[in-house]
Image: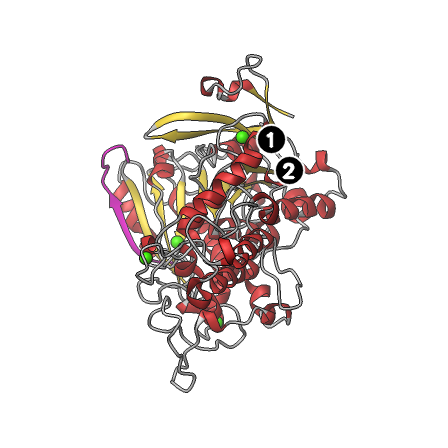
Amino acid sequence: MLSLMVVVLLSGGRLAWAGQAGGTAADPEAACLALLKARNITVTYAELVPATGTVPSYCYIRGTISTAIRFHMQLPLPENWNGRLLNIGDGGKDGDLDYDDARLTQGYAVANSNLGHDAGVEPNSSFAWNNRQAEIDFGYRAVHLTATASKTVVRAYYGRPPQFSYLEGCSQGGRGGFIEAQRFPYDFDGIVAGAPVFLYQPINIAHVWSLQKLFKDKFAGNLAFDADGDGVPESLTKLEVLRKKVLEKCDALDGITDGVIDDPLTCDFRPERDLVGLHCAGDRNADGCFTELQLKNIRDIYRGPYDSKGVPIVKGMALGSEFSWAQRVIPHAGNKLFPTHLGYEVDHVNFLFYDTDPGVPPPDVTDTSYRTNRKANPPEFAWWEFNVDDMTAGKGNLMISIMDATDPDLSRFLVTNGGKFLIYHGWSDGDVHPEPTVDYYNEVVKTTFKGNMEEARKHVRLFMAPGMDHCGGGPGPNEWDRLAPLVAWVEKGEVPTHLVATHSTDGKVDNERKICAYPQKAVYTGPAGAQQDPANWIAANFTCK
Ligand SMILES: [Ca+2]
Ligand SMILES: [Ca+2]
Ligand SMILES: [Ca+2]
Ligand SMILES: [Ca+2]
């Protein structure tokens, strides 16, 4: 065994054993189908997929990991393989097999799982209905075992292990990256984790909590208004007023008035002070103004949830994320009272919060006048009945131990294993609050690197993207190759000092920036006095300082 490993190392691993394991490039179909006969892993399906468009022919397999995890792989033909394995992270509650033709075309062997359940059978969080195994699979087991399984398949198909293994994911997939870095530090050489829901329990509770406030008393505290009087709020004028007021206050703080607040932590916007004059007359709800209750709700969305004694649960949304609230937070006619948060997280309290689940959701989760039946079998439980005090009372602690990924000691992954960790988060993320990611990074610096930021930056880097929404989108530059900077870092030692990100409107780039590795920020160093000219908004005109 030892001598075999030496052979691989001396030959650089790349071409050493290609074609050895049963199949050869001359018979790619036989090599692919041979995986069905693997004796130490369950491959249930194999097919040589013909080339289509720009996607080359590849070997496609599906497999089973006991008991309910299903995974699949897109395996480039041996002559097209770049020697790398890539595990793709999962969004939302997952429950399906995600493809990545783009990475496959680049030569990566790509793997993904269903995280232990099928969304077509058990949609949203319902897979976790009193099912501890499904929760464990979703929480941390599937991502790890898919790494293991995909390495086994790579060895069987190419006859050698991957030269480099990566995990790329955002949101739930970013949480998967945190899980791997903390609990399974020897699975990957590099991990890129975006908008990580690593505070899984608190973030989901935050969304339920804000929805409770916005739906309460026939939307009295909502930021959408029923201007036409049909009983359903449809006007988003209040939200637009708020968004503009925040920008008026803070857009220019970074030196450039481009609709983006580079560092929301420097923005001193206070609704009670900065929305003065916009108070509704007599505190009667009307369009384009704010009642006391609405001002409080705005403050609370920025502040984040807290219990009945004022004990904070997690920091709230950042200033500059308001554009995103119409889609994600605020119930209104345009989203059929069904903002993303209601769709995603409303059943969190039914299935993923308590040790024993309290009940199934009501038939219409937007009808808060519905009276749930606790005596039914199974009983009914509605998100508006959830008491946030259960969080601070520790009733969600078991699920926190399964789902959350808050351990700041990354010494095994970053030091012992020499892994590289690239974290990014949009400052205007209206889904997963961004500030806790900064706090976590600082905790890692403190815990893993004794507070030595420069040493930490050799192993783990954080990129906070100004004006970027959840995993992409938003008014700020938000497009770049998420994986390439990590690969260059791992394989060539090219430390990512910054990312070059673009923002496009109708397919045309209209804003480009360096997104600097925390704690640095992009400072304009282009033609003097011309920083307000959009023509100068190109990465070359900014320096990380
Ligand atoms: Ca998946
Ligand atoms: Ca209406
Ligand atoms: Ca700005
Ligand atoms: Ca459960």
Q: Answer yes or no: disc 1 within 8 Å of ligand 3.
A: yes
Identified by mark 2, the residue type is Thr
The answer to whether any part of residue 439 appears in the image is yes
The answer to whether any part of residue 470 appears in the image is no
Above/below status of 507 relative to 541: below
Dot 2 lies on which element? helix
- Residue picked out by circle 2: 266
Q: Compare residues 145 and 354 and report the one nearer the observer.
A: 354
Q: Compare residues 278 and 260 and report the one nearer the observer.
A: 278
Separation of marks 2 and 1 at Cα, in angstroms: 8 Å
Q: Compare residues 305 and 291 and report the one nearer the observer.
A: 291
Mark 2 and mark 1 in contact? Answer it, CB < 8 Å.
Answer: yes
Q: Is residue 447 left or right of residue 271?
A: right
Q: Quadrant of residue 329?
A: bottom left
- Residue picked out by circle 1: 253
Q: Residue furthest front?
A: 282
Q: How are the residues colored?
A: secondary structure
> In the image, which disc is placed on residue 104?
none
**Ligand 1 located in image quadrant:** bottom left
Identified by mark 1, the residue type is Leu
Other residues around mark 1 within 10 Å, as few (<14) / some (14–19) / many (≥20): some
